[in-house]
Image: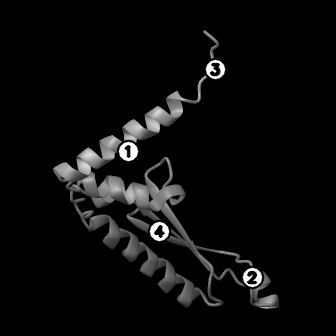
Amino acid sequence: MGLVEESFIAAAGPGGQNVNKVATAVQLRINVFALRLAPPVFHRLKELAGSKFTAGGEIVLTARRFRTQEANREDARTRLADLLRDACKLPEKRAKSRLNRVGKVQRLQGKKIRGAVKAGRGKVRLD
C-alpha cells in the first residue's frame, strides 16, 4: 500500500436513484507511519484523529457530504490537510496564575470558616 489510498463507496443521503447506482462517497486512507512525523506531531495527530485512527497506523476519512465524487474527494483531502495542519501546531503554553499574599490569606481564612461549619455538623453528644 502507498502513502494515500482513495476508494469510492456507496453513500447514503440525498441523490435519489443516483445514490443507489453510483459510488459517490470517498474513503481516504493515509498511512501515518509513512509520513515519518516527529513524535510530538504524531501523538497530536493521533489524538486529533480519534476514532479515525486505526490500530494499523492509518487514518480513515470518509466524505459523503456531497452528491458528486469530485466534491467528496476534495472534501476528504481538505479535511486531511486541516488535520495535518492542526497536528503540526504547537499547543499554547499555559501561563501560571499568580496569587498574591493577601489572596492566599483570604483563601485560607475561607477554608478555616468552611472547616468550622463542617465540624459543627457532627452528632450532638450529651456529656
Which residue, given by chain and number where applicable, does mark 4 sit on?
A: 5
Marks 4, 2: nearer the viewer: 2
Judged from this view, the residue extending furthest toward the left is 101
Disc 1 residue type (three-letter): Gly
The mark found on residue 13 in the picture is 2
In percent of the image, x 42 and y 55: which residue is there? 47
Q: Is residue 85 depicted above or below 72 in this figure?
A: above
Which residue, given by chain and number where applicable, does mark 3 sit on?
A: 124
User: In terms of sequence position, does the residue under pointer 4 or pointer 2 come before the other?
Assistant: 4
Marks 2, 1: nearer the viewer: 1
The reply to whether discs 2 and 1 touch (Cβ–Cβ < 8 Å) is: no
User: In terms of sequence position, does the residue under pointer 4 or pointer 3 come before the other?
Assistant: 4
Give x and y (percent) for residue 110: 38, 44
User: In terms of sequence position, does the residue under pointer 3 or pointer 1 come before the other?
Assistant: 1
Q: Element at badge 3?
A: loop
Quadrant containing the C terminus in the rendered view: top right
Disc 4 residue type (three-letter): Glu
